[in-house]
Amino acid sequence: MPNEPFEHDDDGELAVEAARPKLKKPSMYKVLLLNDDFTPMDFVVATLKKFFHKDHEEAVKITMSVHLNGVGICGIFSKEIAETKVNYVQAYSQANQHPLQCTMEME
């Protein structure tokens, strides 16, 4: 059959090209610390260093944002990593008897 719209391989069978999956970047999430009137600032700084690997200057800057603005961004991560960090911070805060709250939101 002339002008067939399909390609055939050497055996005369229809050659099928594998569909290429369309990859998209994973959704990213901001991990946030929320202000409270009871958690000491030194504890917040230590938490940022421990779980988010911030140097002292960056940890203090984020802590001041939490204190002055009510919220501070700790970092931006994939969903699974953000959830893990939130859970670690919550557990660490509770274990140290502080009400520090950590949450995440889609960027």
Image (spheres, rainbow, N blue to C red):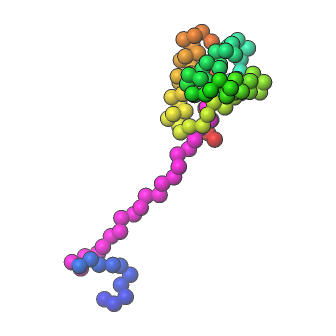
Which of 16 and 92 lies nearest the eye of the viewer? Answer: 92
Image x and y of residue 39, in percent: 68, 13
Above/below status of 97 relative to 70: above
The image quadrant that residue 15 belongs to is: bottom left
Which of 62 and 78 lies nearest the eye of the viewer? Answer: 62
Above/below status of 76 relative to 87: below
68 part of magenta stretch:
no
Residue 65 visible at all: yes
The image quadrant that residue 52 belongs to is: top right
Image x and y of residue 70, in percent: 74, 25
Residue 9 shown left or right of residue 80 in the figure: left
Residue 102 visible at all: no
Specify the segment rendered in magenta: 11-31
| Residue at horizontal 65 percent and vertical 20 percent from the top | 45
Which of 2 and 44 lies nearest the eye of the viewer? Answer: 44
The extreme left residue here reads 11
Image x and y of residue 71, in percent: 71, 27
Residue 79 shown left or right of residue 11 in the figure: right
Image x and y of residue 102, in percent: 62, 24
